[in-house]
Image (spheres, rainbow, N blue to C red):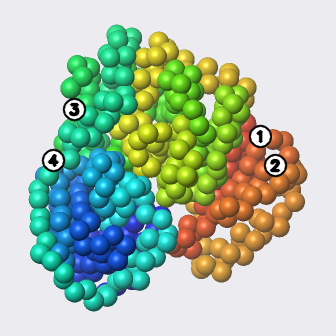
Amino acid sequence: MSDIKFGTDGWRAVVGKDFNKENVEIVSRAIGKYVFDNYGIYKTIIVGYDPRNMAKEFSTLCANTLVDMGFKVLYSDKVLPTPVLAYNAKRLDACAVMFTASHNPPEYLGIKFIPDYAGPATSEITDEIISNLGCEYTKAVEGKLIVTDFSQSYFNRIEEIIDFEKIKEGANKFHILFDGLYSASIGYFDKLLSRNGIEYDAIHMYHDTNFGGGMPEPKPQYMGEAIEYVKSHKGYVAFANDGDADRFGVIDENGDYVTPNEILAILLMHLKQNKSYDGCFVKTVAGSLMLNIVSEKLGVGVVETPVGFKHVGEAMRQFNPIIAGEESGGLSIKGHIPEKDGILANLLILEAMSYSGKTLVQMRNELKDFVGSEFINTRIDKKLENFDDVKSTTEYFSSLEEIAGIRISHKDYKDGVKLYLEDGKTWILVRPSGTEPLLRIYIETDTKDKLENLKNKIA
C-alpha cells in the first residue's frame, strides 16, 4: 500500500501508478468500514464515475468491493457529473463514492466520498477513512448491486429550481454556445436545455479521456475555440464545465471570460432581487472584496470560510445561505445541495440574463458601477524546498507591517495569513497548499499598476 492521502476533495493519483487496483480496493474497503461504523450495514451506497481514463473500470471494482462487504450498492448506468451523484445521495439518504479527479490533468483519477448530507466529506470524516486503510472487516449480510439511472431525478430537481420558461423568453435576445469540453456535463446541461425547448449551439460534444489534448478546466486557455466562436457569431454567450461538472466557466458576448467572483456577485443580486431569496452569503477567504461590498449594499450578511468547498459546504449546512461559492469556480444555492454544481451555475446565469433582459456584458458593467470600483486579482504558486520553508515564509508575511509602501491595517488567520492593506482596496492571502511544499499567494487590488507593483515586491 503506497502513501494514500485525502486532500481538500478526496484522494487523487496517477492511473497505473498509485491509482491502481490494490489501492482502489484498500480505499473502497476503508470507505465501507467508515459507513458501517457510522451508519450500519443497511446504509445504501451509490457509486458513479466521470469520463476519465479507467474511471468506469475502477468504479466497478469499488462497487463490487462494497457489495462483497455486504452493502446495497446503486451503480450509475453511465458517466455522470459529481453534482448529480451528490443530489441523489441527498434524495436517497445514501452515502456516495465518485470516481473523478475534477480539473486535474488527464492522467489523474480520484475517489471522492460524499456523505448523506450531499456535500464534501469534512476532515474528520476523511481522517477516519484514512485510519481505516488496511483494517480488517467481517461481512455481516449479503450485498446487492443495482445498476441505476440517476439523471431523471436530477433533471426534475433542476427544473424545480430554474425558471426555464423565463430563459426560453430571454433566448430571443441572446444565443447559447455549450462547449461540452469532453466533460461529464455532456448529456446533462444540453439535455436540460433540450427538454425545455431552448435552442443552443454546441462544440466538443463527446467524452474524451484526454480531454482534447487540453485540461478539463473551464478557463480561457482551454476554451479557445468557444471564445473564437463567440467572437465570430454575434450575441452568443458560452458555457462550459470541468471534467466532473462541479465547476463552471462563462464567456460573455465580447468573448471575454467572466470571473467566478463576478458570477457569484451577479447571482447573489439575481437571487435576492428577482427571486426573493433570503439569508446570508458564504464565500472563502480568497474571494473578492467586491463580494463583501455587493453583500453590504444588498443588506446581506457574509460568512467567510477557509479555502476549499468542504468548508463552504459545511457553512452551507450551518447557515442555509442564499448562495455560497469560491473563487475557483464552484457554487451552490439555498435549497439545493452543499456541493458545487457547475450545471446549475450556468443555468442560473441564463436565468439572471433573462430576468434582466440585458446582455452579460451589460450586467458586468452594471456590477462594476454598483460596486463603485474595479477589483483585479491574481494568484502566484510558489514551490519551495520543504515544509519548513513554507512555515518560515508564512511567518515572514505574518510579521510584516507594510508592503509596497502601504501599511497593513489588519490580519486574518483563518487560512494561512491574509493581509488587509490600509487603502481598503487591497489584500494579500498567503496559504500553504497542505499536500506539498507549495505556497499559494493571492493578491487583489483596484488598479493594474498597483497589482504589478505588489507582484514585484512579493517576488
- For mark 3, what is the residue? 191
| Label 4: element kind | loop
Residue 93 visible here:
yes
Callout 2–callout 1 Cβ contact below 8 Å: yes
Instruction: Judge left or right: residue 406 versus residue 17.
Output: right
Residue topped by disc 4: 149
Quick one: quadrant of the C terminus?
bottom right
Q: Name the residue under label 1.
A: 425
Amino acid found under the numbered disc labelled 2: Leu
The kind of residue tagged 4 is Asp
Q: What residue is at 17 percent from the left and 54 percent from the top?
A: 76
Question: Dot 3 lies on which element?
Answer: helix
The amino acid sitting under disc 1 is Lys
User: Which badge, 1 or 4, is on the more N-terminal residue?
Assistant: 4
Q: What element carries label 1?
A: loop
Are discs 3 and 1 less than 8 Å apart at CB?
no
Mark 1 → mark 4, Cα distance in angstroms:
49 Å
Tag 1 and tag 4, C-beta contact below 8 Å: no
Residue 100 sits in which quadrant?
bottom left
Q: How far apart are marks 4 and 2 (CA)?
A: 52 Å
Q: Which mark lies nearer to you, 3 or 4? A: 4
> Depth-wise, is mark 4 or mark 2 nearer the camera?
4
Which of the marked residues, 3 or 1, is nearer the chain's N terminus? 3
Q: Residue 421 carries which label?
A: 2
Q: What element carries label 2?
A: strand
Q: Which of 296 and 143 is in front in this view?
A: 143
Task: Kindly indicate the quadrant of the structure image that contains residue 255.
Answer: top left
